[in-house]
Amino acid sequence: MNLKIGEAWKKMIDRIEGWVDQLIINLPNIIIAIMVFIMAIILSKYISKLTLKLLGKSKLQPSMRQVISRLVSVFVILLGLFLILGILDLSKTLNTILTGAGVAGLAVGLALQGALANTYSGIVLSYIKHLKFGDWIQTNNYSGEIVDIDLRSVTIKEIDNNLVYIPNKLVLENPIKNFSSTAQSRVILECGVGYSSDLEFVRELVIKTIVENFEAVETTNEVIFLYTGFGDSSINFQTRFWINSTSGLEVLKAKTNAIIAIKKAFDANDINIPFPIRTLDFPKPIEITAE
């Protein structure tokens, strides 16, 4: 029993001495590897800042610039780790890591198809010239101001100040209506007047009211007034004019102000905006008999 314990103890001492000898032999390589690792971290920070500075001249969204600079930083650190494995003569370990990374990458790629599609779509959206922060867009039955574009989703702020996160893939694959592609937005207002109204006077009054209440409308020629048809209780019309804003909220405010101004003008000139009326026509007089 004592002999076996002595042999085990001797083997353990021999193993420890071998490790110490190996450590002493590889000490220069270990010091070099540590220095390479420190240099890789410092270099990754410098290259990340440089990448961010270079991307500042591009048309990428700020969030995408941050993501790309971080990916570059991670790539530099990984490159440093591979160099360290080579310095420490761990080529077999390196081959094992690369093989495992390939298999793991295939498995992750299959499992994260949706996430990868959103990532690719986010990169593509960042390069679209007419889609940027602050634009008012409509897509996938949502409309609002773009407040962020990252590798997962496009974030828009709706009129009610709620945030909607739309996956990049859906935004890229579906139509996008950008209200901010021009410096102005068109306000479209529909209304109706009674059949007894002077239609020419109504047209002149509405156009004059719009010109007087909106600075962006300088002349009467900039207001479009069209009668659209005979309704059940009114003759319907539509008026269109431009305002100096691309915000959907400002369009609604302008429409509200136009409704108020037109209603005041109609009231001042005894022009009736009729509500639906139903007339009942009886072919014969109704006889009421007392019992």
Image (tube, rainbow, N blue to C red):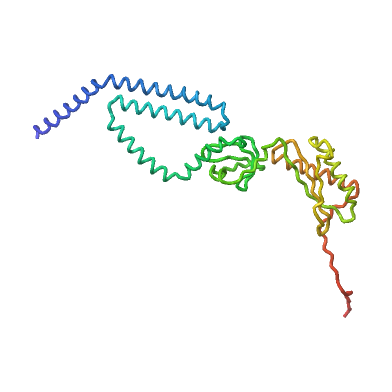
Image quarter hosting the C terminus: bottom right
Q: Name the foreground residue: 232 vs 184.
A: 184
Determine the image quadrant of residue 112: top left
Residue 19 lies, in percent from the top left, at 22, 25
Determine the image quadrant of residue 222: top right
Q: Name the foreground residue: 180 vs 274.
A: 180
Horizontally, residue 82 falls left or right of residue 212, namely left
Against 216, residue 171 (above or below) is below
Residue 4 lies, in percent from the top left, at 10, 33
Residue 176 lies, in percent from the top left, at 62, 43
Horizontally, residue 201 falls left or right of residue 89, namely right
- The number of numbered discs placed on residues in the rendered structure image is 0
Residue 278 lies, in percent from the top left, at 82, 63
Q: Name the foreground residue: 74 vs 2.
A: 74
Residue at image location 90% in from the left, 55% down from the top: 196
Image quarter hosting the N terminus: top left
